[in-house]
Image (cartoon, rainbow, N blue to C red):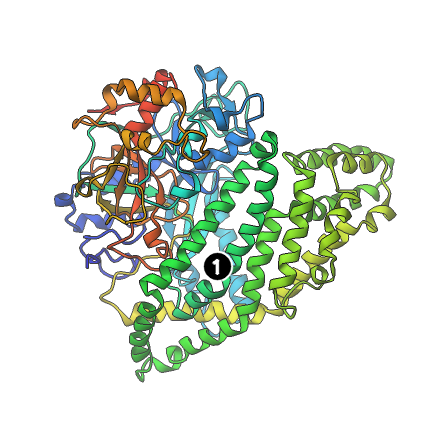
């Protein structure tokens, strides 16, 4: 077992780094001075990875759109991320006449680059530890409210001290279930423009069938550019803005790789639960995730019914459908992996060891009953948590609920104004309506509302559910919605022109939405004490777990802050149920373009390749991008530790050169957010040479390559 890893508990000693488990905070990178990674291939100094005062790798890594990672690849603000990360923005810029999702898009000059409304990227400026400062004001005898008030007060002070009057965004995060605290200083750039994307047939090749599976042949990348004002500062979109100049842009490796080569990933992993108890895992895989899976499938079926009928609807809902489908398969895969891999039993063994320590005389008062308390918390919260999964999918997918609730309050205020007040508010209200009904299919949404409420009524325990939803006539909800003020954009605008407070107060859809949201708030208040107790018990359990194993390497769960993970290029055991398209076992660490063609199926939405692509492959027109062995690489495997949010993260060699972009994990280890499996957990990456080949040869956008630094 290769888990001899560096100990980033921020207080304990630094152990030798040898494996791939763990997502490490960059402020701890200085401690790499005491670790011998040179023989594994790392050639950078700690300051070259993370520095506050000088250019370093961290200056090339950005959080993309709040949910993915991207990397700067030129001094002209050019960045790479995954195709699926840019998917929503590409869809928003597409129409049936200019369908960039289906056909791809390449800007041949900067003036052709497309502003992506609402898209921003976040650069990390610095971070620091404020654990001592905050913990000095806390103690275990405080109530949850007292604790929260102190923490919130300190957060506000820290933000004010470091924002430089609004120049920076300052975020304070807790770690180890609230045992430690760090703040992060960011700079956000809001003028981001689409530069290029391959067509769906390449960027999503393999579709849902290959998602979370190896081998992959997916060209999962897109290209954007970050703009700034004339002084290099963040600015809203303006035609006068200029490409921003990052402090560091990644050189791009043309050297290739082989099994055992060092690989390093920097990115923004979203959320892991590596310290979840066995009780939490059982709740997750037997109740919470099955609810999520079922609700997601119902929503997907409604969307697909209408997407298959109409190209405009297909474009409008493509991003939402892809996101729901991705998590649907992930959640089901997690259930399967946890059961297959014996994750609960492994956690139980760990807890037995902890309990032996907790029952020692010096520990029993604080820690002796923690596990039993957590078990009791889950028993109390079980049905509520199931309700939360069904309601979250309802709110996410049934747009009528969200629209009525959000616009209803605004329209109530508007209706109460005198003539002057209405005139002053009208633009604000109409703009909100425009945003709410952007890419909105009325028939689809009517069916979605009925289907999701019906499922909720069938599956949720009435004792913890929304009385408003249980009282609704699910079969007639679509008709109710269609008769509402909020039925369509036109009906909403008609109300603005003819406001009637009595009419909006009587609106049945608004009553449904307001009642549901009120029920949700009351439900939160009902379980507040149990939630507070659970938070405290979880904090004490992890505090005790760390103390009980002083020789063990603990690292903080992912929480959308920048992390470093190291590993190597590796293979994955073959499976009888997968299409290897000619890959031999010894070469199972990469896929190549001929294997991609071998999967081609004409007329199959997931596996049909564009004719231009097939022609280029037939000509073997790979130029300088083919491997020294003669093949054209597509994807490759490493054993880095990543999760959602790492999508688009750069995979770097020991010198900090870009090898590829991380875009997926493997189904064998979908329990990875809960427990790291060193034998099975892999990262699937798109080879940067395939990215460059697609840009230059397929997209005829070789001018973009000239901006980059290629390392041979």
Q: Is residue 192 visible?
A: no
Coordinates of residue 197 in the picture (x, y in percent)? 43, 26
Q: Residue at x 39, y 69 (%)?
A: 278
Question: In the drawing, does residue 438 fall left or right of residue 35?
Answer: right
Query: Quick one: 196 or 410, which is closer to the camera?
Result: 196
Question: In the drawing, does residue 503 fall left or right of residue 540?
Answer: right
Image quadrant assignment for residue 417 = top right
Question: In the drawing, does residue 510 fall left or right of residue 144?
Answer: right
Disc 1 is placed on an element classified as helix
Marker count (numbered): 1
Quadrant containing the N terminus is bottom left
Q: Is residue 538 visible?
A: yes
Label 1 sits on residue: 289
State the residue lying farthest toward the bottom.
361
Coordinates of residue 365 in the picture (x, y in percent)? 39, 82
State the residue lying farthest toward the left.
39
Coordinates of residue 371 in the picture (x, y in percent)? 40, 75
Image quadrant assignment for residue 492 = top right
Query: Quick one: 445 or 271, which is closer to the camera?
Result: 445
Quadrant containing the C terminus is top left
Q: Residue at x 58, y 54 (%)?
A: 392
């Amino acid at each position: 077992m290769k888990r001899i890893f560096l100990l980033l508990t921020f207080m304990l000693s630094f152990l030798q780094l040898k494996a791939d488990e763990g997502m490490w905070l960059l402020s701890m990178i200085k401690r790499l001075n005491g670790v011998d990674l040179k023989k594994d291939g790392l050639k950078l100094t700690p300051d070259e990875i993370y520095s506050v005062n000088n250019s370093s790798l961290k200056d090339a890594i950005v959080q993309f759109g709040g949910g993915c990672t991207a990397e700067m690849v030129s001094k002209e603000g050019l960045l790479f991320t995954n195709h699926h990360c840019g998917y929503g923005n590409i869809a928003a810029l597409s129409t049936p006449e200019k369908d960039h999702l289906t056909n791809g898009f390449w800007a041949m000059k900067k003036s052709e680059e497309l502003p992506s409304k609402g898209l921003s990227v976040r650069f990390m400026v610095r971070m620091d530890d404020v654990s001592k400062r905050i913990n000095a004001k806390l103690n275990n005898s405080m109530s949850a409210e007292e604790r929260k008030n102190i923490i919130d007060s300190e957060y506000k002070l820290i933000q004010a001290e470091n924002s430089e009057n609004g120049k920076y965004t300052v975020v304070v995060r807790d770690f180890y279930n609230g045992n430690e605290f760090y703040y992060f200083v960011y700079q956000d750039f809001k003028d981001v423009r689409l530069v290029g994307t391959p067509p769906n047939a390449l960027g999503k090749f393999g579709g849902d069938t290959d998602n979370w599976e190896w081998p992959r042949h997916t060209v999962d990348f897109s290209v954007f550019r970050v703009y700034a004002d004339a002084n290099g500062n963040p600015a809203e979109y303006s035609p006068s803005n200029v490409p921003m100049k990052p402090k560091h842009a990644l050189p791009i490796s043309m050297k290739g790789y082989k099994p055992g080569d060092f690989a390093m990933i920097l990115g923004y992993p979203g959320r892991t639960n590596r310290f979840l108890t066995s009780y939490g895992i059982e709740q997750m895989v037997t109740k919470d995730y099955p609810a999520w899976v079922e609700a997601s499938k119902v929503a997907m079926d409604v969307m697909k019914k209408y997407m298959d009928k109409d190209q405009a609807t297909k474009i409008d809902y493509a991003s939402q459908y892809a996101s729901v489908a991705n998590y649907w398969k992930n959640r089901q895969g997690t259930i399967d992996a946890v059961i297959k891999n014996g994750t609960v039993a492994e956690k139980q063994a760990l807890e037995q060891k902890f309990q032996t320590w907790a029952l020692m005389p010096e520990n029993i008062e604080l820690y002796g009953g923690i596990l039993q308390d957590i078990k009791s918390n889950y028993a109390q919260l079980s049905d509520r948590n199931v309700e939360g999964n069904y309601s979250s999918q309802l709110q996410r997918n049934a747009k009528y609920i969200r629209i009525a609730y959000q616009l209803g309050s605004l329209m109530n205020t508007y209706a109460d104004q005198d003539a002057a007040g209405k005139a002053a508010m009208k633009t604000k209200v109409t703009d909100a309506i425009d945003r709410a009904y952007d890419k909105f299919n009325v028939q689809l949404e009517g069916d979605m509302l009925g289907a999701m409420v019906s499922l909720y009524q069938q599956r949720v325990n009435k004792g913890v559910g929304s009385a408003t939803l249980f009282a609704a006539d699910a079969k007639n909800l679509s008709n109710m919605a269609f008769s509402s003020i909020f039925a369509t954009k036109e009906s909403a605008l008609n109300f603005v022109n003819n406001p009637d407070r009595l009419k909006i107060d009587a609106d049945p859809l608004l009553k449904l939405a307001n009642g549901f949201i009120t029920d949700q708030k009351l439900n939160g208040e009902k379980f507040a004490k149990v939630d507070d107790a659970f938070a405290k018990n979880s904090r004490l359990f992890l505090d005790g777990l760390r103390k009980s194993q002083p020789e063990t390497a603990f690292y903080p769960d992912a929480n959308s802050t920048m992390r470093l993970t190291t590993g190597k290029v590796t293979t994955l055991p073959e499976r009888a149920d997968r299409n290897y398209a000619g890959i031999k076992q010894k070469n199972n660490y990469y896929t190549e373009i001929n294997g991609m063609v071998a999967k081609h199926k004409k007329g199959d939405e997931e596996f049909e390749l564009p004719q231009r692509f097939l022609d280029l492959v037939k000509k073997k027109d790979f130029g300088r991008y083919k491997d020294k062995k003669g093949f054209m690489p597509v994807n490759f495997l490493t054993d880095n530790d990543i999760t959602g949010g790492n999508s688009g993260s750069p995979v770097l060699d020991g010198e900090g050169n870009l090898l590829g972009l991380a875009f997926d994990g493997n189904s064998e280890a979908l329990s990875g957010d809960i427990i790291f499996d060193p034998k099975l957990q892999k990262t699937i990456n798109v080879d940067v040479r395939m990215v460059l080949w697609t840009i230059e040869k397929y997209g005829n956008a070789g001018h973009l390559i000239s901006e980059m630094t290629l390392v041979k």
